[in-house]
Image (cartoon, rainbow, N blue to C red):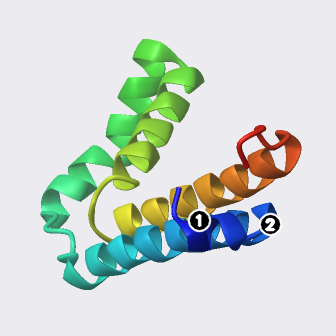
Amino acid sequence: MRAWVKTLSQRSRRRIVAGALLAFGWAIALAVWLTALPPLEDPEAYDVEHSKRTLRELESIGGKSAVLANEIEEWFTGLWHGRGLAYTLAFLTLAIALGYYHWERIVPPSRDD
């Protein structure tokens, strides 16, 4: 291990790594957000998919749970496209950085630190 790394306390190293994770992940999320294209949806196709008749047919075939499952599936699919993907990446980055930070607080340091 490098000499300057050995001089840092465990708390400082934990903060540096968590900060680097946040900076890297949020930079990627920002790049995705800036380059995201607006959704190219056909308004007529949207109206057909979300019309009362279509939803009624879906409910008659699969019940209210099928309608709910369809709505959840559309929401989940939206998380992985365009600006929704950028928000998802930013949230996942925050969760990973906080998880790392707290995990390192809980786990005792190894003997070579």
Q: Residue furthest top?
A: 61
Characterize the local packing of mark 2: few (<14), some (14-19) or many (20 or more) Cα atoms within 10 angstroms. Answer: few
Image quarter of residue 78 = bottom left
Element assignment for label 2: helix
User: 88 or 47: nearer the eye?
Assistant: 88
Element assignment for label 1: helix
Image quarter of residue 29 = bottom left
Numbered mark located on residue 110 in the image:
none
7 lies above or below 107: below
Image quarter of residue 26 = bottom left
59 to the left or right of 100? left
45 lies above or below 64: below
Characterize the local packing of mark 1: few (<14), some (14-19) or many (20 or more) Cα atoms within 10 angstroms. Answer: some
Q: CA distance from mark 1 to mark 2?
A: 10 Å
For image coordinates 40% across by 54% down, the residue present is 79
Name the residue that disc number 1 marks: 17
User: 58 or 85: nearer the eye?
Assistant: 85
Name the residue that disc number 2 marks: 11
Residue 80 location, x and y as percent?
33, 52
Residue 67 location, x and y as percent?
49, 31
User: 111 or 23: nearer the eye?
Assistant: 111
For image coordinates 26% across by 57% down, the residue present is 47
Q: Residue furthest bottom?
A: 34
Residue 13 location, x and y as percent?
68, 66
* N-terminal-most mark, 1 or 2: 2
Residue type at mark 1: give it: Val
For image coordinates 44% across by 67% down, the residue present is 25
Q: Are marks 1 and 2 in contact (CB under 8 Å)?
A: no
For image coordinates 20% across by 69% down, the residue present is 39
Residue 1 location, x and y as percent?
53, 55
